[in-house]
Image: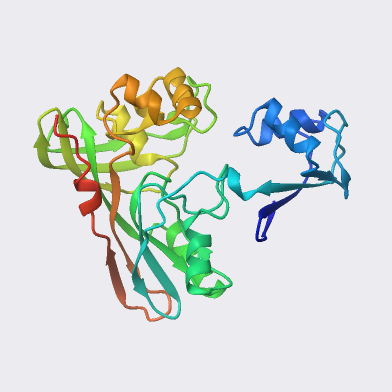
Amino acid sequence: MALRMTENHTELTFRYMRIQGRRENLLDFLLRKFRYLDREEWLENIREKRLMVDGRSANPAELLKDHQKILYLRPDFLEPEVDSNFEMIFEDEFLVAFNKPGNLPTSPSGKYYKNTLVNLAKKQFGWKKLYTLHRLDRETSGVILFAKQKKTAQKMAQMFREQQASKVYKAVLENGLPSDEVFVSMPIGPDPNSSIRIKQGISNEGRPCSTHFRLLKNLNKRCLVEIRPMTGRTHQIRVHSHYIGCTVTGDKLYGLADDGFIKWLEQGQSYLDQTGFSTPRQLLHAMEIGFVHPESNKKLTIRADDSKMMRMIPTQ
């Protein structure tokens, strides 16, 4: 998929490839690939000539062929609002790090294209390229690192693959830890018991995964903990927290039942208010990242202030 951003819209271009040999029409493909719009919304986009197939206006019923070029002229007003108050906390000629707020995606995904940290930072500082090295979930705040040069990005990517970078998180968890220190080593993969595509879970077919939890403070019905992931799997901290009965406070994906999560997607904050859900975002913060700088070979530790998250801890 390729993106090109213009003044009024974002051009999404991709090549169609059928799945399991089965051909599908354009509308079915859009509903499968981009679930953030429903059938009527996609039909409206097609009627407004925002979809093109091989350079011509799209027909929702046309059967797609492999390698056809699909262009979606996505209006920018469709992007949800985000918290764009990110802070630069480290910079040299090779790397830059930010303290990401708790309602800002790292990079383009789903509904978010322009309103992402990587693209807002490029616009603010005038950079043409910025290489994403790792990601934080949209609602997770804290330190996140980017490379300014391709060769540095490649070196850092290898370091991450070989687990040569250490990360420390702080989180507020529901309930109390089973003990002052808990080490979880359970494989993670797609949740076989969930209908939600992005949800992960403990799975024998998953990838090896280890997380260390250390109690910092008991908070009545919750606890404040330091977390050190030994591996870097999708949703690792959130899945392992849920596994030990201590879901991250404010985590909608793992703190709500599947039907509740879907209702939140449909109704937003109003649904959380009805159910008395604890906080508007998950209370998970990337405190620090440590690694050997790929160019200077000096050990570097970058830390991100957590005061915004700490002010959001529920009092009851």
Up the image or down, 196 lies above or below 132; here it is above
**Horizontally, is 281 left or right of 34 in the view?**
left
Rendered residue at 86%/34% (across/down): 59
Kindly indicate the quadrant of the structure image that contains residue 238: top left
Instruction: Report x, y in % for residue 10.
Output: 66, 53
Q: Quadrant of the C terminus?
A: top left
Point 38% across, 48% down: residue:
231
Counting from the top left corner in percent of width and height, residue 116 is at 50, 54
Query: 113 left or right of 240?
Result: right
144, above or below 185, in the image: below
- How is the protein colored in the picture? rainbow
Q: Count the marks: how many?
A: 0
> 102 or 97, which lies in front?
102
For image coordinates 30% across by 71% down, the residue present is 300
Up/down of 42 relative to 105, above or below: above
Q: Please name the residue shown 28% across and 34% down the image.
A: 279
Where does the image place residue 80, in percent across and percent down from the top left? 51, 43
Residue 157 position within the rendered picture, expressed as x and y whole percent measured from the top left: 49, 62
Q: Horizontal placement of 25 versus 38: left or right?
A: right
Q: Nearer the viewer, residue 238 or 85?
A: 85
